[in-house]
Image: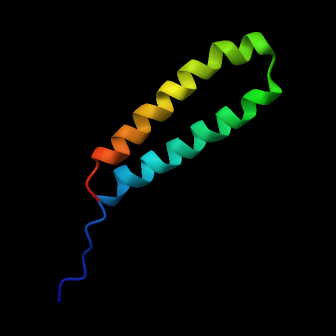
Amino acid sequence: MDMSFDFQPVYPHHDLLVELGQVEMAIDGLSEREDNERGALQPGLESRMQSLLEALDHLAV
């Protein structure tokens, strides 16, 4: 009886979800920053979030 499992397809999905959570937490933390720092960080974080969401949409699970 073969008891091996292939978890390889699960890892990319999980990794994307973890990174998405980290970006969401970073965006939530922007409210505690100075206006100029928030303005510099927010566009990059939002762009990264969009990229992660697109990657999740295209990933077959």
Q: Is residue 10 left or right of 52 when viewed as pictured?
A: left
Q: Residue at x 81, y 16 (%)?
A: 34
Considering every residue shown, the one lying at the far bottom of the view is 1
Percent x, y for residue 54?
Answer: 36, 38
Query: What is the quadrant of the N terminus in the image?
Result: bottom left
Residue located 71% across and 37% down the image: 28
Q: Position of residue 3 (x, y in %)?
A: 25, 82
Placement of 49 over or under 38, stated as above or below: below
User: Within the image, what quadrant is residue 7 found in?
Assistant: bottom left
Residue found at x 34% / y 40%: 55
Residue drawn at 82 percent across, 28 percent down = 32
* Residue 46 picture quarter: top right
Residue lying at the far left of the rendered structure: 1
Position of residue 1 in the picture relative to residue 49 (left or right): left
**In the depicted view, which residue is nearer to us: 52 or 3?**
52
27 sits left or right of 36 in the view:
left
Q: How is the image coloured?
A: rainbow
